[in-house]
Amino acid sequence: MKSSPARGPVYEAPRDLYTVTEISEAVRQHLESEFPRVNVIGEIANLKIHSSGHIYFTLRDSATSIHAVLFRRHAERLALSPENGMLVIAPGRISHFGGSGQTQLIATDMIPSGRGSMELEFRRLLERLMDEGLTSPERKRTIAPYPSKIAVITSPTGAVIRDILDTLKRRWPVAEVVHIPAEVQGPGAARSIVHAFEIAGGMDDVDTVIVARGGGSVEDLWAFNLEEVARAVAGSVHPVITGIGHEIDTTVADYVADVRAATPTAAAELAAPAIDEVARSLAETMKRVALFGAASLDNKLRLVEYLVRSAVFPAITHRMEREELGVDDSLERLSGWWRERRVETGRALDGCDAGIEAAVRDCLSRAGASISSLMGGLLRSSPAEEIHLTAGTLVHLGQVMRIRVSGALALRRKELAGKMRALEALDPRGVLRRGYAVCTTIDEGLIIPRVEALSAGSEMTVHFHDGAARCAVRDKRKGTPWRKKQASRKPSDGSTRS
Amino acid sequence: MAKKASFEEALGRLNEIVKRLEEGDVPLEESMKLYEEGMRLGTVCRGILREAEDRMKRLTEETAAQAREGQ
């Protein structure tokens, strides 16, 4: 520390070289001028009441301590009788004793600390939870970006629940919101909040839990600094957003939550996306889809994967539902768009399109079904829906796989159906149906492909489409068959006619 | 058929049959045989596809059930 001569130094101008006495004295003067009147909160330890009447002790908190002395003239006026472990506020000044080389608090009083004890409790609990790793960043879970169901734990009375419900409804009306009422202040608060978390934990379709309380004094918010509440928040089955008090209030619950919001309303904002922004990102997605339009089957499968994996996908169906467009309508638009793309790029329809369309159709209709029953409140009616609602990465991946496979299957089915149609068109019996007949030998049923194999009198079977006839050959002739009797009447010189 | 034909093999053979019949110079008797074989192959292929779909459906349901339990 530099002190200029103009300001009137309280000790000799600093130099590089000090004697022990000089530096000790300099420290003393500095401390006394810097801390002439302080109030120190701490726990009493190493208490010694000297025969002289002076009281020697140390004040400490979790890891640090400072020596302190209370001289007899003040000790005689103490309102409390000090004990080790007692938490007090001690007013006084800080000084340094050259003889023992110790920095000390020269106390003038000891006041039992109420508020001080709360702060100490707060820090102790927080430290303990930190040691257990409950506040570590790796423990923080991601909040579902497009939640289907949000549980709100807060008081049933007051403005907080109303503000939260309004905010959620305005931003993300598609989510179902469940209010789990809880006392948020007073002696029953901790038990009530813990119970509310148990209820929320029992609902396996909840995406996000909000726990909130409006602003108030430190005492009002105290429930959120209690260990049982902090553990309920940390142990919540679903990710938790806290919105407790005002911006400046931070409770232990805030530290162990997955996300801390400054206020209850801010918590609601963090829990749900704004539907208008989602609509914008949907438009962006459709633009990307357009880029994929002319691509190969493989790319299209990747597109489906992209659509499903992107968090926006469920939002697409939400949005459609909101605008009261049926899934069929959106399919119609999607395939209309597809046709346009095809014309635009001037590419012929390849067999793959059908496969991919089937996959998209499948995918959309499943999503659509899931959304409509969500709307209807039939939350766990089908496994497909369960998949959508769980919305975890794993489930997404599983679905992508499924769509890939069902796309491939649809393609195969299509190919097979094409072949079978071609085959049916070639059914030899079709020829018979058109009026032709087939001759076979009587005994072996071998087809008689030429007239040479026959002679007058031999028998054969003639097959028609509706049956067969047994026939005997009367006559045979190679080449042109008989037409009319007249045509063969002039035998001898048929070639020359006048 | 000693071993069970794969879908691809069956479809490949079906393809050959259709091509052969389309060429048109097949004796009627052989064409009947080809036709029969083709129809049989179609049934086999459909069976394989149906089986694959069933399996997929079953797996999906199992996964969903597990997801429910795991929550």
Image (cartoon, rainbow, N blue to C red):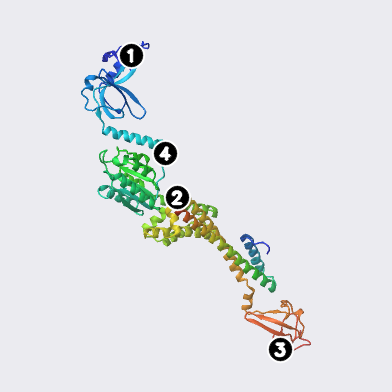
Label 3 or label 2, whichever comes before in sequence order: 2
> Which quadrant of the view contains residue A224?
top left
**Amino acid type at image mark 1:** Gly
Say few, some or many: other residues with alpha carbon within 10 Å of mark 1 (under 14 / 14 to 19 / 20 or more): few
Mark 2 belongs to which subunit? A
Q: Quadrant of residue A53?
A: top left
Q: What residue is pinned by disc 2?
A: A392
Circle 1 residue: A99
- Distance between the Cα atoms at labels 1 and 2? 68 Å
Q: Residue A239: give x, y in percent of width and height.
A: 39, 46
Which mark is in front, 3 or 1?
A: 1
Instruction: Name the residue beneath numbered marker 3.
Output: A485
Asked if disc 4 and disc 3 are in contact, CB closer than 8 Å, the reply is: no
Please say if the residues under marks 1 and 2 sit with CB atoms less than 8 Å apart: no
Q: Dot 4 corresponds to which residue?
A: A137
On the image, the x and y values in percent for residue A398 come to 50, 53
Q: Residue at x 60, y 70 (%)?
A: A424
Query: Do badges 1 and 4 share one subunit?
Result: yes
> Are the residues flagged by discs 3 and 1 from a single subunit?
yes
